[in-house]
Image: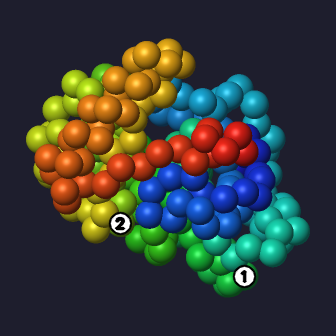
Amino acid sequence: MKKINEIFYSIQGEGRNAGRAAVFIRFSGCNIKCPFCDTKHQKGKEMSDLEIINQIAEYPCRFVILTGGEPTLYVDADFVDKLHHKGYEVAIETNGTNIVPANVDFVTLSPKFEFVKNSNIKQLVCDELKVIFNSVNNMDAYNVIIAKYKYIQPCDTGDDDTNQMHIVNAIKFVQDNPDWRLSLQLQKILSIR
């Protein structure tokens, strides 16, 4: 059984797959507590793999994003195999404190070690590295991670002035470091889920 916060159909709002239709499986619970987390971890429904697969089959999309919370608390290679067997391409969004099953198709790693104690990463290889940018990050700390694509995403603090400062500094960082790209949260800009 897996504790599911919600399953919904939308578009990916961030990173390399931004704008792509996706079925989101949001797992409940996390092994770290980020101050800016937008998931209500107390919510959740226990579901079997079959129940999850039956629910996502309601949508026309064959791209699934496992997110959270922290999906590696629940996801194993067997579950990913079941999704593949049904024709799904599987992506995962993780904080990297656990190793991702090797059969996941696309790994987004978003480390939180700069924000939360005891959140050291174990997953050092990914498709996409996404750093929550707060204008004072130690970006050299991310050099140990091997990633095909590297993004910074301005941290949403809830304060317009602080957010604007993070955006301006993020743009400057990308201009000064062109191997990085800027990722904005389209779901917030477009007011969608």
State whether residue 64 appears in this view: no
Residue 130 image point, x, y percent? 36, 49
Left or right of 15, for residue 42 = right
Of the two numbered discs 2 and 1 in the rendering, the one whose residue sits closer to the viewer: 2
| 54, 187: nearer the viewer | 187
Label 1 secondary element: loop
Image quarter in which the C terminus is found: top right
Q: Specify the label residue 24 is tagged with.
A: none
- Which residue is denoted by mark 1 in the rendering? 86
The residue that appears at 63% across and 32% down in the rendered structure is 39
Find disc 2 in the rendering and name its residue: 127
Q: Where is residue 78 in the image (x, y as percent from the top left)?
A: 59, 71
Residue at 31 percent across and 63 percent down: it is 149
Above or below, comparing residue 82 to residue 163 in the picture = below
x and y percentages locating residue 139 in the rendered image: 17, 39
Q: In which quarter of the view is residue 76 placed?
A: bottom right
| Residue 14 horizontal side relative to residue 121, left or right | right
Judge from the rendering whether residue 81 lies leftward or rightward of residue 123; answer left or right. right
